[in-house]
Image: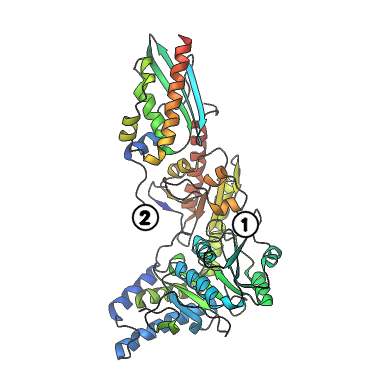
Amino acid sequence: MSGDPYSPAVRALFAEPGHVGDVDGGEWAMLDEQGVRVRLSAVAKAGTIEAMRFRAWGCPHLIAAAEWLCGYYEGRPLAALEEFPRAPIMENLAIPTEKTGRILVLEDTVRSLGQKFGEGS
Amino acid sequence: MTTEMVYLDYAASTPVDPRVLDRIREVAESAYANPSSTHAAGRQTHTIIAGAAKQLGGLLNVDPQTLIWTSGATESDNLAISGTARYRAHRGRHLVSMRTEHKAVTDVFDMLRGQDFDVTYVDPGPDGVLDPADFEAALRDDTQFASIMYVNNETGVIQDIETLGAICRERNVLFHVDAAQAVGKLPIDLSKLPVDLMSLTGHKFYGPKGVGALYIVDRSDCHVEPLFYGGGQQRRIRPGTLPTDLIAGLGEAAEIASGLIEADLAHLRELRDILWTGIQDIDGIRLNGSADGFPGILNVSIADIEGESLLLDLEPICVATGSACNSKSQEPSYVLRALGRTDLEAQSAIRFSMGRPTTRAEVEFAVSKYRDAVARLRGMAPGQAA
């Protein structure tokens, strides 16, 4: 017996992700761990993230979280990349605890992206 | 095609045929007496059960007296394997089965291992077909029982039951067949097949859930110890008050299947061809199983695709996945692993299973959805062109 493993938010974000792709002229980071692959790329202007895009190979929760994350960071300062919004993601998307490892890969990718921007400044 | 649910999971369960439903309702309303009672109402119920046994016996071409009613294939498998192994333990404690059997079989063998039985699981070939020579090589002087499924529930692979059974007869090994996916779908003549026990269930061939049967050959050396105790029903092999309405429904489903098997097979072959032809050119696709398996099942793996996302993207098509069916476990299918598939290949596997009510339009819709889903997910993955 099992109910729907996906929250309405996960279903919506997975079905129509508006942030799939790559940005030109910015930084990118990619991780391949725990059976998932995530690539994040972003472009910033005057210390603010103008656009963020993702590519992902993984479960619907990971793809939905990556999509949510791109929307979250756009318009925020680059310094925000040092603080990963793990709790809001887990709550807003109702990510099951057994998927936490995949969200941690996303978190590491964000940190790696932040470091790339730090190195470039 | 609409966006309404498209059910392509007939190997998991089938809808109840309306004629079966009518029969169940009729019997439930009119024949409520205990079939063990000797009064007129009990005798009426008993007659209905005997009639259902005759219908099922007709489908399998066996004496109705050789059929034991159960709650379904899981109970039948348990009764056949555990009951026979324990009854014949004095003849030997070695048992043989196959790596790709259903859990209702392997879990029983694993349980028996804990009771000092020795179990050998034979591996099939990469196409899922068991080589009779490998099977024969696994038999020993102390082998007393073997169990091989007729049609694999994940891949649709059909085993050569006639040859395997003949080997068992030669070696004096009792032979059980889990035919949950075969009864009512393939022509089966138990008067000719060298099979000693056969498990079946109603809900795989348009009958009700909660009822099945175990065929036990009428021979002095083939007997099973009961799993349950508490009455003398069904020769004490499976005591308990029988569900007359469900049994009548199963009998009706058997009667209907008797006249439709060839037509059903032709219909399923056509649908399977449409499905496979529609997707076989996709880069990285791989058929799991043999090309000449049961046509109601098509199992495919696909490279560079994550299975759980594929399954969600295929909605509203209802299919089965090659993983453990829920987000809590991504354990790849042990059946596909036994065929040599990698974890990733097994995890990306989708089982399409079609049935009597499946239409061409539904299968064409499935082809379109599958192609779209693969393209979308590949387009989303790192390393793919934008």
Which residue corresponds to mark 2?
A: A1
Q: CA distance from mark 1 to mark 2?
A: 29 Å
Left or right of A72 on screen, residue B159:
right
Q: Position of residue B268 (x, y in %)?
A: 54, 60
Query: Residue at the location (43% across, 22% down)?
Result: A111
Residue B259 visible in the picture: no
What is the chain identity of the residue bearing mark 2? A
Instruction: Please name the amino acid that badge 2 sits on.
Output: Met
Left/right placement of residue B122 relative to residue B8 reads: right
Q: Is residue B132 visible?
A: yes
For this rendering, which residue is in front, B200 or B329?
B329
Residue bearing the label numbered 1: B128
At x 56%, y 70%, the residue is: B177
Label 2 SS: loop
In the rendering, at what x and y percent does residue B296 appear? 53, 59
The residue carrying pointer 1 sits among few (fewer than 14), some (14 to 19) or many (20 or more) residues within 10 Å by Cα, namely many
Tell which of A71 and A47 is nearer to you. A47
Measured along the vertical axis of the image, is residue B283 above or below residue B176? above
Amino acid type, mark 1: Gly
Is B344 in front, or is B320? B344
| Residue drawn at x 57%, y 75% as measured from the top left | B89
The reply to whether discs 1 and 2 touch (Cβ–Cβ < 8 Å) is no
Residue positioned most to the front: B116
Q: Is residue B83 above or below residue B51?
A: above
Q: Quadrant of residue A70?
A: top left
- Vertical placement of residue A83 versus B111, above or below: above
* Mark 1: secondary structure: loop
Point out which mark residue A59 bears: none
Residue A54 rendering spot, x and y as whole percentages: 45, 26
